[in-house]
Image (cartoon, rainbow, N blue to C red):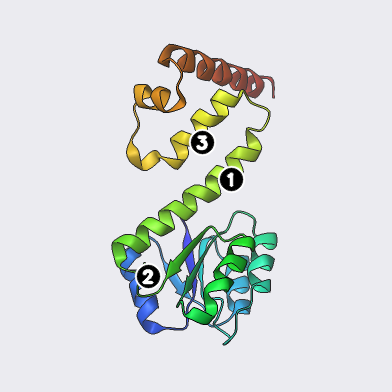
Amino acid sequence: MGIVAALIRSPEQLHRLRAAIRGRYPVSACGSWDAVRRLCDAEPVSLAVLDFYVGGTMDLDPVRQLRRLYPRLVTVGYVTLRPDRVRDVFDAGRAGLDGLIIADRDDAPTYLWAILERAETRSVASSLRTTLVNCDPTVRDAVLVAVTRAHENLSGDGLAQLLSIPRRSLTKRLTQLISFWMKLRLQV
């Protein structure tokens, strides 16, 4: 993760975000959507934590613009959920957010950090899925499981068991793919 852009109106929520990150990455508070875009243009921002109600009403167009302009940017919503906003959560999901933090429910530092890590993993897995579209389905699944479950420190046997394939077969397929990629690199 690089710089974290935070478009959060509440000082308490910004403090909780910083407490969850614990100095691992710099957090840059932004006062507007334009400030987020300027920061993304000028610095290596890898994560944006966004309150889409920062202007008073929900606005997802800036989220869509960020996703279009910075396709590798991981976007996470940080919202206060009220009964009149429940349907907005579904709209936020359709806007392409990688994660959602609900204030006063998910924002204890441990939970918040876990949400940020899962969002980053989902984003990486999405990029990998498109890269591996023409690969052997077992190899593609193995890579995606290894990335999305990296926190579990899966062994080769554990990965093979999850994929319901003998370990030797999985090793053979992965070795063939690596050999193929190495030959391609040597030709270039």
In the rendered view, tell whether residue 66 sits above or below residue 59.
above
Counting from the top left corner in percent of width and height, residue 52 is at 56, 76
Q: Which residue is at 36% across, 60% downward? A: 113
> SS of the residue at dot 1?
helix
Q: CA distance from mark 3 to mark 2?
A: 28 Å
Q: Which mark is residue 144?
A: 3
* Earlier residue among tags 1 and 2: 2
> Mark on residue 126?
1
Specify the quadrant that holds the N terminus.
Answer: bottom left
Q: Is residue 23 visible?
A: no
Q: Quadrant of the C terminus?
A: top right
Q: Residue furthest bottom?
A: 56
| Crowding near the residue tagged with mark 2, few <14, some 14–19, many ≥20 C-alpha atoms within 10 Å | many
Q: Nearer the viewer, residue 97 or 184?
A: 97
Q: Is residue 113 left or right of residue 186?
A: left
Q: Residue tagged by mark 2?
A: 17
- Looking at the picture, which amino acid does disc 3 mark? Leu
- Residue 95 placement: quadrant: bottom right
Query: How many numbered marks appear?
Result: 3
Q: Could you tell whether 132 is left or right of 76 in the image? A: right
Amino acid found under the numbered disc labelled 1: Ser
Give the alpha-carbon distance from disc 1 to disc 2, as whole Å: 25 Å
